[in-house]
Amino acid sequence: MKIYLLIMNVLGLVLMLADKQFAIRKTRRIPEATLFAVAALGGSLGVWAGIWLFRHKTRKAKFTIGIPVILAAQAAIWWLAMAK
């Protein structure tokens, strides 16, 4: 499980960096649905880090609010699972 989460978070971070570079170059972009899917599948910390490290998607409320909400929900689920 730890390896999976590490991979998903690194993937989220890399996708945010790649999308930022694509935006600068005005070339193809990574769909927002893909970024949210990676976040929902466990990469929310990586996507959130990418938002702030690369200053990407900071003007979009669905990212600046949505990704932390996903991260908080995942942390709560993890906490509840570990409390048993």
Image (tube, grey):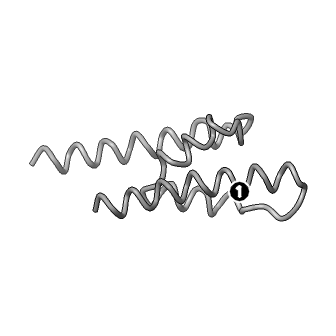
Judge from the rendering whether residue 16 lies leftward or rightward of residue 59; answer left or right.
left
Residue 51 position in % (x across, y down): 63, 40
Badge 1: residue crowd in 10 Å (few <14, some 14–19, many ≥20): some
Q: How many marks?
A: 1
- The residue drawn where x is 60% and y is 43% is 50
Specify the amino acid type for callout 1.
Answer: Ala
Asked whether 33 or 2 is in front, the reply is 2
> What secondary structure is found at the residue carrying circle 1?
helix
- The residue drawn where x is 43% and y is 61% is 7
Name the residue that disc number 1 marks. 18
Residue 24 position in % (x across, y down): 86, 48
Judge from the rendering whether residue 79 lies leftward or rightward of residue 20; answer left or right.
left
Residue 6 position in % (x across, y down): 40, 56
- The residue drawn where x is 23% and y is 43% is 79
Judge from the rendering whether residue 75 lies leftward or rightward of residue 10; answer left or right.
left
Please identify the quarter of the rendering in which residue 71 is found.
top left
- The residue at the far right in this view is 26
Asked whether 62 or 58 is in front, the reply is 58
Give the answer, above or below, for where 24 lies relative to 72. Answer: below
Image quadrant holding the N terminus, namely bottom left
Residue 47 position in % (x across, y down): 56, 48
- The residue at the far left in this view is 84
Asked whether 21 or 37 is in front, the reply is 21
Judge from the rendering whether residue 15 lies leftward or rightward of residue 37; answer left or right.
right
- The residue drawn where x is 78% and y is 61% is 29
